[in-house]
Image (cartoon, rainbow, N blue to C red):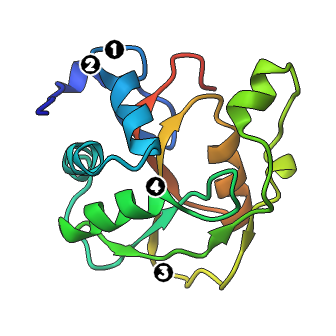
Amino acid sequence: MEISFTESTRPTVQGVKAVGEYYAFSNREIAHAIKDGDPAAIRTAAKAMSQLLTKSEHRLLIPVPSHLGKATYTLRLAEAIAKAGCGMVYNVLKCPERETLYSLKQRGIATSPESLGFFLQSPVPEGWEIVFVDNVVATGTTAAACRALIGRGEMLVWAIDSTAR
């Protein structure tokens, strides 16, 4: 599965680097396959996402926790990106187990960065570039929660939903 995008096809949201738009091409299917832990999808996404970063030994790749309270598929994605020389995985972001954001959105329940309950298992060292790794930015709530907790950093995702703020 080989997918490439030009600069002009990449959506732009401040503080977010994305390979493409969620509903374009086969991005939605790949995003779901990443979430399901599909190794081929994770390799494909990591290769494309790595191309959005320069090589760096002074960058922390922080995988975003799922509704299960810990990083799962995002950890595997961050590890694959790290193998490309784009940083070091720092798996310290956690949250209480909760319903999925998609499910909450479907039921009309509003979420906020604070409602996710993100916390750090260990402090984030000063002087490192911070990149949060996730598969999709849909509403921007997760991105806002990550930045609010640490005070800096950008998101690196496979796709961004056109409704993201």
Task: State the separation of the CA atoms marked 2 and 4.
Answer: 25 Å
Q: Which residue is mark 2?
A: 9
Query: Residue 73 location in percent, x, y?
Result: 46, 55
Amino acid found under the numbered disc labelled 4:
Tyr
Query: Residue 116 location in percent, x, y?
Result: 79, 51
Q: Which residue is mark 1?
A: 24
Q: Which residue does the image show at 63% across and 26% down from the upper left? A: 165
Please report contact status of discs 2 and 1: CB closer than 8 Å, yes or no: yes
Of pointers 1 and 4, the one earlier in the residue sequence: 1
Q: Is residue 20 visible?
A: no
**Crowdedness near tag 1: few (<14), some (14–19) or many (≥20) residues, C-alpha within 10 Å:** few
Please report contact status of discs 2 and 3: CB closer than 8 Å, yes or no: no
Task: State the separation of the CA atoms marked 1 and 3.
Answer: 36 Å
Of pointers 2 and 3, the one earlier in the residue sequence: 2
Q: Secondary structure at mark 2?
A: helix
Residue 67 vs residue 82, the one in the foreground = 67
Task: State the separation of the CA atoms marked 2 and 3.
Answer: 32 Å
